[in-house]
Structure formats: C-alpha cells, structure tokens
C-alpha cells in the first residue's frame, strides 16, 4: 500500500471497512435479483454487460438497472427508490425528465425528429444563449466532447496555430487532444487512452492549474491556438482556482495571442450564466453540454464576435468540401426543442436560488458529519456541486488531486450509500443538488453517510 493510500485512509479502520464492503456486496445481491438477472442477460451481447463500460463503475457486484427516473429520484427494476445526487453526472442536473422538456419533446415528436434544416426553436435558443452567456454567436453538437472538438478545430483554422494548452488532470470528454498528463514535470500521453496512434504531445501543451509562471512560459513561443479549460477543475476531483488566478491568466493568454475556451459543462452548477459570468471572466469561447437540453443528448459552443468573424473567414477561404465539423444530427429538431424548454423554463433564476441554498446546507452538513467522525477530509463546493475529498485541505492542482484519489475507499462508501437509498457520483465523492432535491433528501444523505462512516472508522 502506497504512502498516499495510507494518508487517504487516516481515521479509517481498514479491516472493518473491508468487512463492511463484503457485507454490503452481499446485501446488494440479495436485494437486487432482477438487476442481477438483467446483468446476466446483458452480458451475452453487450460489451462489459452494459451500454457504456462506465456503467460498471459503481462498485456494485453487478450493474444496477434502472426502471425509471423522475425529478431527484431513481427507481430500479427491483422497485427500490433512491434519492439521486449523481443526476447522470450532471446530464440531469436540473432533474430527471423535467416537465417542460418532456412536454416540448412530446410536442415535437409528432412534428419531426431531424431534417438537417433550421427551425424556430433554433433562433430562440441562439438568443437565449447569447443573453445568458454574453457571447453573440453559437453552434451545436451532440455532446460536449464534440463541442470541444469543434471549437478547437475552428480556433486552429482561425488562428493558423496548431497547438492547444490544457491543465494537468483535465477532462473535456473524449476529445483526444486533451489526454496528456504531466509526469515528473514532463508531458506524457495518458497511458489509459485506448487505440491512440498519433503522438498527442506534438500538439498539446500541458501545465499545472493555478501555476501562472508555467502558463506564461508555455505560451511564450506563440504557437498555442487556445487554452481549453474548466474554470474549476472537476473531473479529477474539484480543484478551485486560487484567488486572482483567472484574472491574471486571461491577461497572460491574450498577451501571447492565444484564445481562451471555457468548458462550463460541469461548472454551470455555479449559476444561470455559469462560472465565467458569475466571476466576471470573458472567455473567447464557451462550451456547454449535458444539462443544456435537460438530459437530451446535445451541446452548444459559443464565440465572441471577433472569433466568429475569423472562423467564418477561414471557412470561406478553405477549399470546398467537408469541414470535419458537425454531423447530420447536429441541431436536430428534438434537441432544439429540448434546449429551448430547458433554457427558458428549467434553468431559471428561481431554480438556482433553490439549488444553491440547499447546496450550502449539504456542504455544512457534510463538514459536521466528517468532523463528528474525526476524519481529516475537506468539503469543496462550486455552486450546486459539492464534493468531499480525502485530504484536510483542498488540492490546488491536478497532481495533488490525483494523489488523494482512493477508488477502493470511494466504492465502499458509495455502495454503502446505495444500499441506504442514496446515490452519489460513482467516481470521486461528488454530489449535485437539483431543483427537485428537497431538504429531506439532504438529511437522508447525511444520515446514510453517518451510518457508513460509523461502520468503517
């Protein structure tokens, strides 16, 4: 066992924790026979027995199968109803099947799914996005991965520069360019990336988050087209920007002629206009996926007027043929109807007022629960997104965040919560508050966590 693992388990009785985990696996198996049968059936024809291999990441003996999801609750095929703080890892951040989106989809379903033509909804969505995020021009994609890929292509074409810069430990979906890490200070292609044959380090620069000097040095050559970043790192565990970091970083980026792309797919938890708007930041482009359509597959990316003009000029000057940007289902009518409903009726100021207030209650309750068990853990919050981390003080960069990850301990806690009627995100210890989450749900989560911690400390 590494010294890092030992440090994450300070205060944990590991012998008790392992015995608890075995008992919880047995309890899960007894309580979920229908899921077990479906998992066996799915194993015959689905790779890893699930539609996406991530669905096996819950720490359960077999995949849990859902029957329905509504609001902030999920009901599995064995009839167990669980309070959901995972919310599709942000895809359902505004609740499962929000009524305005469901109504819009039902209406559109009889009027066409996809035509590769524009609709009135598209114009309304563009107006809503421009007003909300302060960027005047927008395009669409089927996922945040594609939106990130497309905006990087547009910026490379517009600037004539080939490189991008990302922060160590970042995640921007499965756009290949970002899977470069710092190992002993050197950029290395992430070894978990399957099937990658081109050397990503030739066109991707990586530095630590919150390191202004490294950012300045990395951009000095003048060959970086854009910095692609979440304003708060979220996928390696949450890493907050140091005070003043983004204000200074923007100055450095622009001094070197690079552009700033902010991926707000997770940090839309901050408020109606995302983290950038809430903190007065002015990115050149912005990406938002998952929740913008209420959980329907779609994503958006916006540009400043200057970048849009350069992108249009690059397209006009390019040879005729496929641009490599977009698919025939991009901007389909179902997705546009969902986004219109989500932006106008779901992602409202009132919804955020509820979410942010309840998130504060959850964060404080977590701190009290952790303190009651004398564990050296911290709680990090970005609006309606909260996470407890196995360290006394929050990490300041991706390397620090990576060192405090303990997947085995996480799975023990998460399985214990599942068996007590509560779901949190299966990787790390992340929770989301939706407009449908109630104070009683928060109390149920805190009580369940208290019970789990009592069994492993």
Image (cartoon, rainbow, N blue to C red):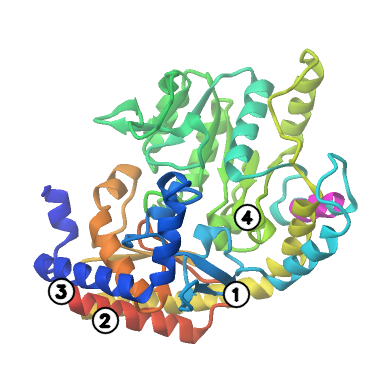
Instruction: Specify the quadrant of the image occupied by residue 365.
Output: bottom left
Q: Which residue is mark 3?
A: 457
Q: Residue at x 32, y 68 (%)?
A: 415
Q: Which residue is mark 2?
A: 451
Q: Which residues are magenta?
A: 122-129
How packed mark 1 is, by other alpha carbons closer than 10 Å (few <14, some 14-19, many 20 or more), is: many
- Gap between marks 2 and 1 measured at Cα: 25 Å
2 or 4: mark nearer the eye: 2
Q: Relative to 29, is 19 on the left or the right? A: left
- Identify the residue at the far bottom of this view: 440
**Location of the C terminus (image quadrant):** bottom left
Query: Is the residue 256 above or below the residue 396 in the image?
Result: above
Q: Relative to 333, is 456 on the left or the right? A: left
Q: What kind of element bears circle 3?
A: loop
- Gap between marks 3 and 2 measured at Cα: 10 Å
Q: Residue at x 74, y 27 (%)?
A: 311
- Residue 238 seen in render: no
Q: Which residue is mark 1?
A: 71
Q: What kind of element bears circle 4?
A: helix
Instruction: Specify the quadrant of the image occupied by residue 58.
Output: bottom left
Q: What kind of element bears circle 1?
A: loop
| Circle 2/circle 1 CB separation < 8 Å | no
Ranked by sequence position, the earlier of labels 3 and 4 is: 4
- Gap between marks 2 and 4 measured at Cα: 39 Å
3 or 1: mark nearer the eye: 1
- Gap between marks 4 and 1 measured at Cα: 27 Å
């Amino acid at each position: 066992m590494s010294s890092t693992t030992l440090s994450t388990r300070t205060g944990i009785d590991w012998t008790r924790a392992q015995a608890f985990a075995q008992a919880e696996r047995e309890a899960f198996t007894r309580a979920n026979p229908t899921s077990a049968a479906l998992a066996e059936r799915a194993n015959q024809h689905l790779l890893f027995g699930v539609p996406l291999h991530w669905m096996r990441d819950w720490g359960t003996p077999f995949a849990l199968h859902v029957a329905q999801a509504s609001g902030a609750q999920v009901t599995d095929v064995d009839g167990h109803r669980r309070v959901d703080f995972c919310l599709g890892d942000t895809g359902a951040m505004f609740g499962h099947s929000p009524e305005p989106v469901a109504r819009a989809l039902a209406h559109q379903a009889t009027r066409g799914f996809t035509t590769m033509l524009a609709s009135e909804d598209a114009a309304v969505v563009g107006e809503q996005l421009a007003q909300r995020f302060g960027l005047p021009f927008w395009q669409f994609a089927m996922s945040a991965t594609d939106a990130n890929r497309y905006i990087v292509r547009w910026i490379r074409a517009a600037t004539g520069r080939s490189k991008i810069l990302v922060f160590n430990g970042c995640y921007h979906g499965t756009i290949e360019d970002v899977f470069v890490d710092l190992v002993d200070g050197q950029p290395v292609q992430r070894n978990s990336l399957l099937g990658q044959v081109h050397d990503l380090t030739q066109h991707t620069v990586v530095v630590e988050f919150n390191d202004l000097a490294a950012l300045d040095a990395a951009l000095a050559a003048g060959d970086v087209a854009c910095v692609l970043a979440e304003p708060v790192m979220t996928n390696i565990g949450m890493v907050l920007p140091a005070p003043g970091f983004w204000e200074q970083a923007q100055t450095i980026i622009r001094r070197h002629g690079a552009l700033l792309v902010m991926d707000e797919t997770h940090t839309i938890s901050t408020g109606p206009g995302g983290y950038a708007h809430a903190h007065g930041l002015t990115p050149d482009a912005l990406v938002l996926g998952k929740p913008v359509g209420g959980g329907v597959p779609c994503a958006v990316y916006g540009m400043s007027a200057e970048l849009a003009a350069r992108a249009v000029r690059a397209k006009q000057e390019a040879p005729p043929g496929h641009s490599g940007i977009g698919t025939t289902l991009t901007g389909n009518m179902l997705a546009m109807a969902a986004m219109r409903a989500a932006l106008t009726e779901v992602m409202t100021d009132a919804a955020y007022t509820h979410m942010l207030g309840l998130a504060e209650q959850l964060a404080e309750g977590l701190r009290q629960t952790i303190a009651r068990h004398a564990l050296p853990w911290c709680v990090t919050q970005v609006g309606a997104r909260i996470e407890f981390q196995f360290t006394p003080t929050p990490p300041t960069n991706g390397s620090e965040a990576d060192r405090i990850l303990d997947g085995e301990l996480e799975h023990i806690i998460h399985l214990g919560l599942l068996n007590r009627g509560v779901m949190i995100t299966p990787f790390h210890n992340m929770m989301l508050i939706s407009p449908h989450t109630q104070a009683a749900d928060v109390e149920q989560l805190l009580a369940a966590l208290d019970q789990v911690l009592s069994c492993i400390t």
